[in-house]
Structure formats: structure tokens, C-alpha cells
Amino acid sequence: MIVLHYTAMDSAAVALERMCDPEPEVSAHYLIDRDGTTTQMVDEAMRAWHAGAGAWGDITDVNSHSIGIELDYCPPFEGTLKYDERQIKSLEILLTDILHRRPEITIDGIIGHSDMAPARKFDPGPMFPWERFAKAGLAIWPQDVADQAPDWDVFKKAAKVLGYRPPSDDANGWDAVLFAFRSRFLPSQVGKLSERDMGVMLALAGQSPLA
């Protein structure tokens, strides 16, 4: 898989220094500066400490099965902040290169940190342009969406097919999954489980090769 992150730090230089320090036990394979500069820190064949606790599908040790890409981005406490266009273009180039070299990685395996660690992580956040990457063949996006009646049991089953795993199998755990799912696919959606949530999740689960 490929897991996308944001650094939530003041600059790429600060993030690079931290990830090269063995004390914090955090690292990633790549770091992309806001100006588009890409730095490789760990060989793709080696394990990096970027994902932490969480799961995607049947994979519970995500660090051992993924390439981690950190984006130099720090979300504001209020308002919105778009990702720098230079950074996004560099990420497109990097993902295209990785997929070309590694046919075992398919676009459904390109996920956000929040996808595999709902409630614990929130990156790359609602401002990340997932739909743009999908149009470039670098991510999944729902097709032929039809709103469906809200049904938590159906939503949970479809979410598990897609790959989501709640941090706990209770209302709080599934609320965290809904929040992570919305952050990626429906960033303007709020409130209780909706017809649009259902339609998008069912469309995505139907596209998943795990279905």
C-alpha cells in the first residue's frame, strides 16, 4: 500500500530533522516540501515507522506493507488551507512512478493515514484533493452514486469491504470511521449518517476488488 500523511509541523526542514532523529521513532519513505522538492529518507524495500497502530482490510501491521509519503502541510485551527500546487504535482509524479515500478500496488491501496487509523489520525485532511488524484488514475473515487436509506448495519458491512476497521466496535468507533470516510470523500457532510453517505460508501464498496 501507499499511505499519505501530512507533517503538521512548521516546515519541511523541521519535519526532516525529526524523522531523521532515532529518538522519536518516526520516519517515512518520502517527504515532499511545499515547494515540490521530494526527499527520499528510507529505501522502499525497508520498513519505515510512519503508520503506527491501525489497520486496512486484513493488514494490521501497515508499516510492514506500505510506503509512507509525508506532505509538508500544517492545517490551521480555523479556516481552510489548500495544498501547494507544486507539492501536489510532485506527489502526482511520485505516485505515478511508484505504480509504474510496483504493479503489486493498485490504486485502491493508496489511502490516507486517517483511513487506517480513524479517531487517532486525521491526515491528509479534508483539503487533500482526492478527486483530482482519482481523475489522474492515482486513487479511487465513487462512480454512479445513488443515495440510499441510512442503515448502519449496511454501512458497516460496506465499510469493512472497502477496508475500514473501527478503533472499537461500538458507536464511537463507527462514528470515527464515518468521520474519516467523510474527510476523504464527503468533506462538507456533517451530522448523522445520511443518504449521501450510504450511496457513496456502497458505490465504493462495489468498486473494491475485495467485494
Image: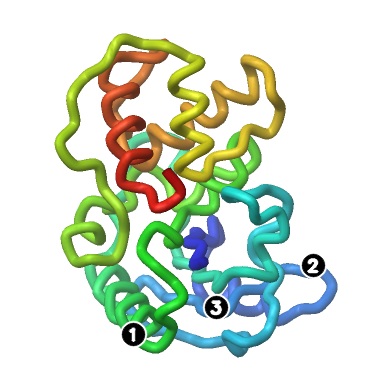
- Residue 71, horizontal then vertical, whole percent: 45, 66
- Could you tell me the amino acid type at mark 2? Pro
- Could you tell me the amino acid type at mark 1? His
Residue assigned mark 2: 24
Residue assigned mark 1: 100
The disc, 2 or 3, on the residue closer to the chain's N-terminal end is 3
From the image, state whether disc 2 or disc 3 is nearer to you: 2
Q: CA distance from mark 2 to mark 1?
A: 33 Å
Vertically, is 151 above or below 72?
above
Residue drawn 32% across the image and 34% down it: 187
From the image, state whether disc 3 or disc 1 is nearer to you: 1
- Residue 132, horizontal then vertical, whole percent: 20, 57
User: Decide: marks 2, 3 in contact (CB < 8 A)?
Assistant: no
Residue assigned mark 3: 13
Q: CA distance from mark 2 to mark 3?
A: 16 Å
Residue drawn 79% across the image and 69% down it: 25
- Residue 126, horizontal then vertical, whole percent: 36, 42
Q: Is residue 35 visible?
A: no
The disc, 3 or 1, on the residue closer to the chain's N-terminal end is 3
Q: Is residue 26 visible?
A: yes
